[in-house]
Image (cartoon, helix red, strand yellow):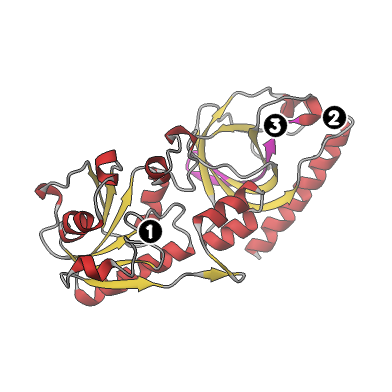
Amino acid sequence: MQVIDVHPPLTAALVPSQPIVLALGFFDGVHCGHQAVIARAKREADQRGLKLAVMTFDVHPAVIYRGVAADQVKYLSPRPRKIELMADCGVDLLYFVHFTDAFAALKPQAFVDQYLVGLNAAVVVAGFDYTYGKHDIANMQTLPRYARERFAIITVPKAVAGGQKVSSTRVRKALDEGDVDLANHLLGYRYQTSGTVVHGEARGSTIGYPTANVQAPANERIPGIAVYVVRLKVLGHWYPGMASVGRNITFGPGRPVTVEVNLFAFHQDIYGEPVRVEWVHRLRGDMMFDSAAGLVKQLGQDEQDAVAYLKELTD
């Protein structure tokens, strides 16, 4: 897959020499609904013998349209993860348009002329609720007016799970509430985050449960405070474990939220190593214990429950 950055305006050097099928969306998380859009575009591309392209953006549109501070956005799929997920979907060309003020100010007709016709799109595919400006005038219902029969248009209906639309907002809410099981169902895969193992307080080692303290990138969304079954990828291998997202309230108030992963039967030194955390299942909520002994007892039960859950997945 070729990854292409577009710093507006679009230049001729970035335009494909042959027509393409172009899927549109921000695609944060590349969840089941997004996958349906890309899969529909992929089928069309295969039928026509064309390359499949996706056009997305470097930042969430809310940064431009709603004035949300860029450093406050927590993504389900920051750029590196989005690239991986798009490659898994069979995308040939992935365009990251840099969402500048000038780009945001484009009128609908200019957007269509410069970026859809401009990218040599034979077919444009998007979800039913895709917009490219003000939602009342720049939506999939009005797109044919701007297209002027220069390309075909395919609108993909909403994906539904549990009687509700599958959306990035719904995935974020599930993660914030610690419901990784629902988030994974909506995503169609197990949610992953990245990070680096850093030095913590080393308290886990003193109670028999050493942990890897994982510092995630500031722009990546971490599940809410709870205890989870996880897998952690480090040094090229996946290892089973359990993770606590919390403030370690047993050891005092006002502590920062940390991600601490205890790997089962793992004894290597991995400080400073980049890791990937796969969030498999929520075990329980956060709890405060009267003593370290009470915490140790609960951790023993958590480990049993985590091992049993992972065994069920592989049986």
Mark 1 closeness class: few <14, some 14–19, many ≥20 residues within 10 Å = few
Mark 3 closeness class: few <14, some 14–19, many ≥20 residues within 10 Å = some
Residue 314 at x, y = what percent?
Answer: 63, 62
* Mark 3 or 1, nearer chain start: 1
Q: Which residue is mark 1?
A: 135
Which residue occupies the extreme bottom position in the image? 47
> Label 2 is placed on what type of residue?
Ala
Q: CA distance from mark 1 to mark 2?
A: 55 Å
Q: Nearer the viewer, residue 210 or 228?
A: 228
Q: Which residue is mark 2?
A: 292
Q: Nearer the viewer, residue 294 or 307?
A: 294
Based on the picture, tell me whether residue 251 belongs to the magenta stretch: no
> Label 1 is placed on what type of residue?
His
In the shown orientation, is residue 297 left or right of residue 115?
right
Which residue occupies the extreme front position in the image? 136
* Mark 2 or 3, nearer chain start: 3
In the shown orientation, is residue 65 left or right of residue 92?
right
Which element type, helix, strand or loop, lies under badge 1? loop
Q: Main secondary structure of the magenta part?
A: strand
Range of residues picked out in magenta: 232-248
Query: Could you tell me which residue is drawn at 15 percent across and 65 percent down?
Result: 19
